Amino acid sequence: MPTTDSDEMNIANSHTFAPWDEASAVPLISFKNVVKKFGDFTAIDNVSLDIYEKEFYSLLGPSGCGKTTLMRMLAGFEKPTAGQILFDGQDISPLPPNKRPFNMMFQSYALFPHLSVVENIAFGLKRSNMPKAEINQRVDEMLTMVQLQQLAARKPAQLSGGQRQRVALARSLAKRPKLLLLDEPLGALDKKLRQETQFELMDIQEKLGTTFIIVTHDQEEAMTVSSRVAVMNHGRIQQVATPAEIYEFPNSRYVADFIGDINILEGHCQTGADNQLQIHWAEGITPINATTNTAMRDDSECYFAIRPEKISISTSPPADAENVIQGKVLDIAYLGNLSTYHVEVAPGCVIKAQAANQKRLSRRDISWEQTVWLSWTSTAGVVLTQ
Amino acid sequence: MNQRFSWFNATSLALGFAFLYIPILSLVIYSFNSSKLVTVWAGFSTKWYGALLNNEAFLDAAFMTLKIAFVSSTLATILGTMAAFVLVKGIAFPGRTLFSAMIYAPIVMPEVITGLSLLLLFIAIGADRGMTTIILAHATFSMCFVSVVVSSRLVSMDNSLEEAALDLGCTPLDAFRSVILPLIAPAVISGWLLAFTLSLDDLVIASFVSGPSSTTLPMKIFSQVRLGVSPEINALSTIMIAIVTVGVVVASLVSKRSVINQRKQEQLAAKSTIE
Amino acid sequence: MWLLALFLVPFLIVVKISLSDGAVSIPPYTPKFDLQAGIAGIKEFIAALDFENYVYLTEDNLYWKSYLSSLKIAFISTCLSLLIGFPIAYAMACSSESWRPTLLMLVILPFWTSFLIRVYSWVGILSNNGLLNQTLLNIGVINEPLVIMNTDIAVYIGIVYTYVPFMILPIYATLEKMDSSLLEAAKDLGCSNFKAFWLVTAPLSRPGVIAGCFLVFIPAVGEFVIPSLLGGSSTSMIGKVLYDEFFSNRDWPLASAVAVILLIILIVPIVLFQKQQQKLQQAAQ
């Protein structure tokens, strides 16, 4: 059972690149109180966010949350109803799409069906004043980057889905944009190809040093590729943080629930010393011991959120755990490497716990209807107020 | 739908096509009849074709008809394409609903009404009736057909293609020229062909708006046919049918080839996925 | 908005042309404008008489009769077209995939050849000593030639012949899209072949049938060429009356009045047709 009860955040992803933590860093893109309305419908509701150079920034949310609208405003296809979008400190709202140093990779790829792969990649370059020799050189470079040299003369209809995706990427990067917008770039690929391509995208981004903004509804994708993730819902930003922070320290039930699997228990808190907290969540059951950095009022309503993999499950009472609850196994979901146990700890209250399947199936010692003990440390979960 | 093909189906197809083609075939056969009496077969002859070639009135009318058809269909194609754009892009302007209704109305409107009202209009603005008025009338009338054909193509086109062009640095005009136009070209061409045939074919509107000096081929044919069957008209009809048939068959072969090409491309794409 | 800039210009040109070349009262555009055109035209020629023409129309039996008989002929022809067109469209939809483009082309081909020629071809067939009568006489089915030419029957044949592709195409389009597993499901649930057709195919093909009927009925009401070539003096269709009034009697105001009334009669089906098309488009989206 991997336990992550580190008191301080010490996660592999938080390497040295973190311009958002530096007070002196100037954002490349700033949204300042941006509102976008379509008739009566508010698609973007007072959004402010900063994106720094060389970031791989994800806009994550369910369909209709406004993430695509946000991106289309950056590309210039939509104009904000109110607020400003700054690029290098300049308001870019009046600029038409063709005057912006950004390029976009479309969800449908939008490859021109009447042009070959080479012509598609060269399309944007031909619109600038680049000399012909240089265009050819750049196109070659792009073809090499996406490994499509052999297919240069083909038309989009003659390519597979994955190849089309590469052409679209090469085309949108050919002009060396200051900012690349990717609208669900991997949505049309099957799962395996998508995972491979995610790493390719990260490699390319690192090599070119271009700022990438990606719109996606796939949380795994956002977690894998991003330097930071902005979780959106109903036209608002719910949380902006690194993938690890989003996962470990969601700031709301919405974010906690949207990313990964989680148990959320509702209760009332009783504050103690040193950020210690007791949460009374069900009659006659020992309260949960937890810690929090937010100041909580005594007896205020709160939610305790804990990931299933942070809960240990055992067939005998654990010796020294900060939180222990006894329950009965209702269901076991066998996922191969892991099993998720649905444990009823009180009538109608089920907590999910996950454990690695280190032993073979036949020798597993937990089965249905068995009485088990769930345990976790006081720092394993987060306390949420909303 | 792909069901078992029954005897009933075969019979209805056979009878249906017989109904559609026997009249035309009889026309073609009797155009080679040497007798002046259309209904009595008196041996094979091409003399009516010779007579037709020497009939200058017919030739003049044919030439005039072609000229009118060419100019009016070109005009109709330009206007119809624009109208299709305005309708499909959903640009809001006062009277949009009226405009879209106006585009579809002439397609079902009886020609006598269209012809008469156009004539009254030309008189109201004091236009001299002649070739120009026929061209204008044909252009307005067939523009609606063009816009229907073009807008169906525009509707099925991915909007992001245009956005991609803009994103890559095209001005809106540039995007239209280098991306949209090549993609809707087949629809524009078939719209033009449709407008061209409509104009060649039209009798009623032309008779209303033409002046004394301008007689189109259908008007000429009509005045002859009213008097009864004439072998010269049979010959003329055969020539026209032959031209149209060749044209349609060639066009469908070309499109069939492009379908085959497309299949090949899809196979290629499938293969490259496996690789 | 750049969108507006791009499309405002062509739109303005379109408007300008519809207003200048086409002018305010370009009638093919809209019934509303057309009315104005008709009335404006009448006013221009005989400003004082105004509605006298309409009064005249209502008083003279000839016009009433031709309106009614036009509607009757159009209605019967539409029914006949449906009876002939549906089996053809059905058979086309049932045929194998490889045959369909060819069959479709065969249906469309006559449409590309001159309308006038197609109507004319029937003259040679239907006349008293025409192909049909000769064949029938030769094989001894009849003893004396049938009089078809210059009767209403000839007009029916002419209208059905020229407009049946308009019936076939929309029906074929809806039938072709139909999922054949629907019929299999119906049979699986205990329908006979005929019942499956009646309960599944027929209702699903309704949009095509309706569109086809409108496409035949509306132009057939105002048809002019067919009654004047194939119909006799007893066949009075309003298109022909209008044309004669206009060209033979040179009574333009009266012709305009005839046209306006014809238009009023046709507005209802035209509007219905457009409503249905819009509904179909929305459903498709």
Image (tube, rainbow, N blue to C red):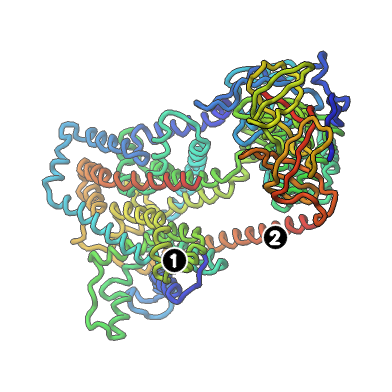
Check disc 1 and report the residue beneath it: C90
| Horizontal and vertical percent position of residue A195 | 78, 44
Check disc 2 and report the residue beneath it: B264
* Label 2: how many Cα within 10 Å (few below 14, some 14–19, many 20+): some
The residues tagged by marks 1 and 2 sit, at their Cα atoms, a distance apart of: 31 Å
Task: Report whether C81 appears left or right of A313.
Answer: left
- Marks 1 and 2 on same chain: no
Report the chain holding disc 2: B
Q: Residue at x 26, y 43 (%)?
A: C264
Report the chain holding disc 1: C
* Label 1: how many Cα within 10 Å (few below 14, some 14–19, many 20+): many
| Horizontal and vertical percent position of residue C55 | 13, 41
| Horizontal and vertical percent position of residue A147 | 84, 46
Q: Is residue C1 above or below residue A223?
A: above
Per the image, label 1 sits on a secondary structure element best described as helix
Task: Report whether B91 appears left or right of B270.
Answer: left
Q: Please state which of residues A337 and C97 is positioned toward the viewer in this rendering.
A: A337
Q: Residue at x 33, y 70 (%)?
A: C124
Quadrant into which the N terminus of chain A falls: top right
Per the image, label 2 sits on a secondary structure element best described as helix
Q: Please state which of residues B238 and C227 is positioned toward the viewer in this rendering.
A: C227
Task: Report whether C72 appears left or right of B20.
Answer: left
Q: Residue at x 14, y 38 (%)?
A: C52
